[in-house]
Every structure is written in C-alpha cells, then in structure tokens.
Amino acid sequence: MLLRQGKVTREYLSYLFVPNGILVSKLEGERLHELKGTCVTEWIQANNLSSLRNFSAFLSVTHWDFDGRFKRITQTLRLNKLPEPAADGSFEINSLPFYPVEYASPGVKDSLRERGRMFWKCRQRNYVYSRSFSDDDIRRSADSRFMVDFWVYRQMHPNHEELSSARQHEPYGDTMPEDEQHLPESGDAFLMCLPTKVFGFNMQKKEWTKLDVEFLEDVKWNEEAFKQLVIEDSTKELVEAVVTHQLQEEGDTDLIRGKGNGLFILLHGGPGTGKTLTAESVAEVAKKPLYRVTCGDIGTKAQDVEEVTISSMLHLMLIEGILVVLLDEADVFVEQRSLHNLETNALVSVFLRVLEYYDGIMILTSNRVGIFDEAFKSRIQLTLHYKNLEQWQRMRIWENFLGRMEKLEQRRRTQKDDGIKIPTSLQFGLDANGIRDHINELAAANLNGREIRNALSTARQLAVHRKQRLEYQHIKRVIDETIKFDMYLTQLRQGFSADEIRHRTGER
C-alpha cells in the first residue's frame, strides 16, 4: 500500500532496489539536468536497518561512459542516512539520494529518455544548440551553437583526464562497437544511463566547453537570414546558386588527385556594407557551422599559417568540408607579392597552397581589394562588390532591426504576464510605432549597417539608464553624436571620406 503512494519504511528498503532496475541519482544535484540514470546490478547490501546511528547501505550500479566507444562503468553508491520518517515510519521514496525510476515524475522519465536520444546523436559529429547559452538580447545566438565531435576532441586532447579515465574501464570487454548504428534493444536501461555531459566546440569563441546534454537541441537553421539580406536580388540569386551547386556536387573534378574542390567567394567593399552578414547567411543556407578566422587566429608569418592549418581544430574539421570558413579582413594573406618583401611573399604562397587543396566553402572579405595578388583571381569563383549603402538599403536595415525588436517586445510582454524574470535590457519596452513614423529620417542618416546596429544598442542602453521605453528620441540622440564625429573625421581628412581616400590610393 505504501509503495503505491510512493513511500517506503526502513524495514522494506532492501526490496526497493531490484537488480536490472533503473535508478535516478541525485548525487550530483537535484536540478533536472543534474539527475543521472544508473542501472542496479545486485541487491542492496544494508547493515543495521533498525539502527538510526549505525545504518549504512551499499549498492552496485552501472552506467555508460563514452570516449569514442560506449563502455559500461561499474560503481558503488553509498547510503549513510535516510530521510526523516513520518509518524508511521515511512518516507517519500524520491526523497532518497537515489531511487527507482518508477517513483520519478513523468517529466523526469521523459527528460532522461530525451537526453539519452540526444547523446546517442552526439556519438557522431553533431552540431547542436544549447538552451543554457541562449541570449535574450537582440544579438544573434551564434554563441549558443556547438560542434560535438569526440574524434576531433580526442585528437586535440589525447591526455584529457576524463577520457583517459574512461579508457581504463573496459571490464570483461563490455563495450559497444564504434560503428554501431542502431540503438540497443535494452531501451531505457541504455538511454537513461548515458552520460549527462558532452564536450562541444564553440565556433565563435574557438574553445571547448562542457555542455549539459539536457539543454541540447538540434540546430534550427535560420534560412530567413538570407532572405533578409539587404543586397540586390540578382546578387542574392547568384550567391544562392553557387552555394547550392557546391553542396550538390560530389567527388573531385580536378584532374590531379588530392586537389580540393572548394568554393571561394570574395566579398569586398567598405565596412558595414553587409559582407560578414552575407557570410553568416550563406552558412545558414548551407546548413553548416560558420568558422570565422582572422590573422590574429592563424598569425601573419608563413610558418604560423602552415602550422595552424595543418595541426589545429581548423584543419581537423576542414579536411571533410563540414564548415563554411569566413576569412575576415583577408588583406594580409592575399597582398600583392613583390621582390622587396620576402616575408609577405612566403605568407601569400603558403596561403595559396592551402586554398589549392581545400574542399569546402570559404568566404574572404576585404576592404582593400586593390592590393590583391593576381594569383588569387583564378582561385576565386565569385567576386561581389559591396558599395556604400543607399537610402533604400538603410531603410530596409532599420526595418529588419525594428522587426526583431518587436518580436522581443512581444516576448517581454508574454514573460511579464507569466511572471518570468525579464532581462534589464527589455524591461522598459519599445515604442515601435513611434520609431517607424520616423523611419525616413533614420534612413537619411548616412550610416553603414554596423553603425545602425550600434546606434540601436546604444540607444537602448540610454533608455534603460533613464528607465524609459526605447523611443525615437533616444535613437536620434545617438545618431546626432555619430554624425558629429563623422564630420570631425572628414575635416581631419581635408574633406575626403575614408572611402574616397581608399579609392585615391588604389586600395578599394
């Protein structure tokens, strides 16, 4: 009768843990993502069940670990203290530090199963989104995406303590083949007992992070991002065509075995004209992670470039063409070679060799296309020039940002109604209609895309500081300051803009 109520007394504790039964362990914490599934291997060994002081119990359990292969790990759980009993001597079964899964709430059971299915997906390379890293701001959630790849992680961390420990546990050859494609028939006994954490590589920060599997989801690719690009429709169609064709192409087309079949796109023009956003949108269309590389990541010496492209994360993941690589501000790698600068010559030569054998999509951006070495022209399949934004483009950009902020405002209201804590940057709201009434004045200001985004971000901070909702007056205040600074720079340059100076020197 007590068991049906989810309760048990001390005397019947020995019958609660049945061999081959699944337990929910709270030893690492009681929050949902901290709960862990284990499988009982034998009856519990309990001493002095009738004694409050000298009570102790031991339970042998197993769970699965993974280092590229699944391995069953045996451990002993210890129980030294029981929950405070009620008047009839009973206590809640799920108040124990570990308890049979039958007494867990439906939500806990479902969570353990779904977590197991996600980990099963992650046994092979998988690009995932982590809810625990989500951003409530208007910034994109690229920092929430991670590449899970045990093979790459092992290559880069051969002596990692956790992986080394997992390799030592191979009792009686109780392992699962690496190429296992189907879930074991044991069902919950396998799924619920899989690891709770996994290492994922953040493409933006270029670092490995330990992730809670509970928070992982499949990446939802934002194909709308490409549609919202503020460039000519004909240009957009051309980009989509070459990217789609690249994804459909199979095998090498080069006569020399080993040479790459990569797609190289050059985007050149002034800052804030949409080059980086185009690269990000291409990655969404291609449904591949975007890996952004600058000279700070791979160095500016030939030896540095060669070492990084041969031995780094970049190399390990590029060899299979699974990334869209954005080489931002590529000028230093593609500069015109000359008889007087041997170091630059060596750097450019190494980079040319890397491109020659690369298989995948690489996008290069530059503000100084006039200094490009002639040899790069034959490597680049598509070249797009991004001119300074026209007023119709600025209006579209303002509309896009405003639309995103309206969605956040709608979410803010929903969260407020549901009693959910609201981030400070959202709590005072947005006067979207008032801002839209002045959209022509906003678009008339000669700002690039990055300056528009920065103006909105600064205006929002100003509104929060004043404890006001974001209105046109806040944005206007920021834009006025930006224009003053631009006018000052133009005076310093004797009336020429930065773009005009680049044209005069032949760099752009």
Image (cartoon, helix red, strand yellow):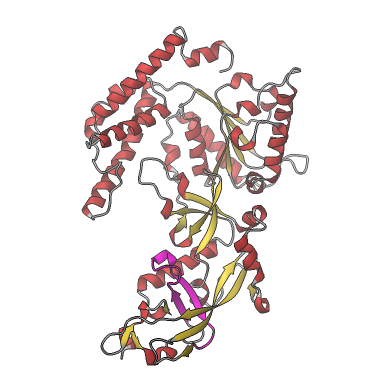
Q: Which residues are magenta?
A: 22-44
Confirm whether the magenta stretch covers residue 100. Answer: no
Q: Residue furthest top?
A: 494
Task: Decide if residue 69 is in sight here.
Answer: no
Q: With respect to residue 22, does 288 lie above or below?
A: above
The N terminus, quarter of image = bottom left
Residue 76 lies left or right of residue 154; in this view the side is left
Residue 3: image quadrant is bottom left
Q: Residue at x 65, y 57 (%)?
A: 154
Q: With respect to residue 102, does 361 lie above or below?
A: above
Return the x and y of residue 27 as percentages of the image width and height. Answer: 45, 72
Return the x and y of residue 306 as percentages of the image width and height. Answer: 71, 38
Return the x and y of residue 402 as percentages of the image width and height. Answer: 31, 35
Q: With respect to residue 4, does 315 lie above or below?
A: above
Confirm whether the magenta stretch covers residue 31. Answer: yes
Task: Decide if residue 313 is in sight here.
Answer: yes
Residue 114: image quadrant is bottom left
Q: Residue at x 51, y 86 (%)?
A: 19
